[in-house]
Amino acid sequence: MALLLALVMGLSVWGIFAGIRMYRADARLPGDLALALEVGSTRTGAVDSLVDRLGMRYAPAVLRLMGPKLVAKYRRKIDLAGNPGGLTIDRYAARRAVYGFLGGVGGLVFLVKGNFIVAVILFAFGAFWTEVGIWAAIRIRKDVIERTLPDFLDVLAVVVSAGLGFRQALDRVASKYEGPWADELRITLRQMDLGMSRRQAFAELRRRNDSEQVAMFVTALQQGEELGAPIVDTLVSLAKDMRRTDAQNARRKAARAVPKATMMITTFMVPATMILLGAGLILGSGTDFGSITGK
């Protein structure tokens, strides 16, 4: 009897492991997604990693539904965001599948219960949550690059004027910086090491960054190379122009903030202050409201 029980338990365990192997064998990962799960797993959080693994089976179907044009559009957005957390187009599709399922099912449940506000919020979560993360990453990355670039150009000009060639100076200064701009420069230098021309590598740098200052940097380098202008003078002049542009943008933002602050004050703070003052005056006057209302 004990031998028979042990045999049944052994067959059960073998069946479970065989089922797991068959399940995993059916889940064929795209190459981009498999690489992201191996390399990017150290760069992403636990929640995103779990979502990626849950949605990996459905990523190819989502990409087919999106179509080539939409896939190219979101691939471009992911590049502009700097692949945050090892994000690739396949990982994006995996997250889109999981969040879409959760938001859709949750929205339908609350819709049946009659809670329309929560249902709309869940539907919006399923449809746009992944895009919100990409949009936020694009804005943060662009702001960080534009703040870093003028100081980087000043340091680069000093190193070039000390006698190093532009390629060596770029490598030396980039190794001392951290953040998205340093990552972009390392990618550019890596492309040049692999045989890409300097002009083409910097054109790719401009394509990966939707920033006016990066475009100015690349254009100035290319024009200086064509015209034979001294690179140090070009870098110093470019840094001054970027700081002037930053100051102008700051003044524009401040000018736009004044009407918004005025509207908030007149809409919320002034009425609330008047209500508090009126209530204080009435309560402090000692008026007997019982005699007025007859109670």
Image (cartoon, helix red, strand yellow):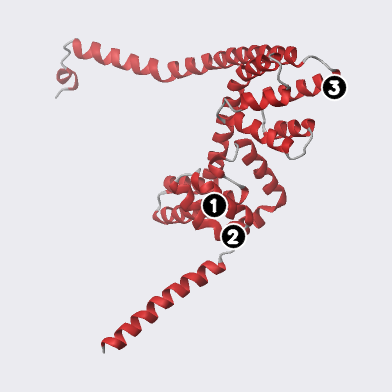
* Residue 244 visible in the picture: yes
Nearer the N terminus, badge 3 or badge 2? Answer: 2
Q: In the image, residue 2 lies at what x, y percent? A: 26, 86
Q: In the image, residue 105 lies at what x, y percent? A: 46, 56
Q: Which mark is residue 226?
A: 3
- SS category of the residue bearing label 1: helix
Dot 2 corresponds to which residue? Answer: 29
Quarter of the N terminus within the rendering: bottom left
Nearer the N terminus, badge 1 or badge 3? Answer: 1
Q: Residue at x 63, y 17 (%)?
A: 155
Q: Nearer the observer, disc 3 or disc 2?
A: 3
Q: In the image, residue 292 lies at what x, y percent? A: 18, 18
Q: Residue at x 55, y 69 (%)?
A: 25
Q: In the image, residue 28 lies at what x, y percent? A: 59, 63
Distance of label 1 from label 3 (alpha carbons): 43 Å
Callout 2, which amino acid?
A: Leu
Quarter of the C terminus within the rendering: top left
Callout 1, which amino acid?
A: Glu
Q: Residue at x 84, y 17 (%)?
A: 228
Dot 1 corresponds to which residue? Answer: 38
Q: Give the left or right position of residue 118, taking residue 183 as reference.
A: left
Distance of label 2 from label 1 (alpha carbons): 12 Å
- SS category of the residue bearing label 3: helix
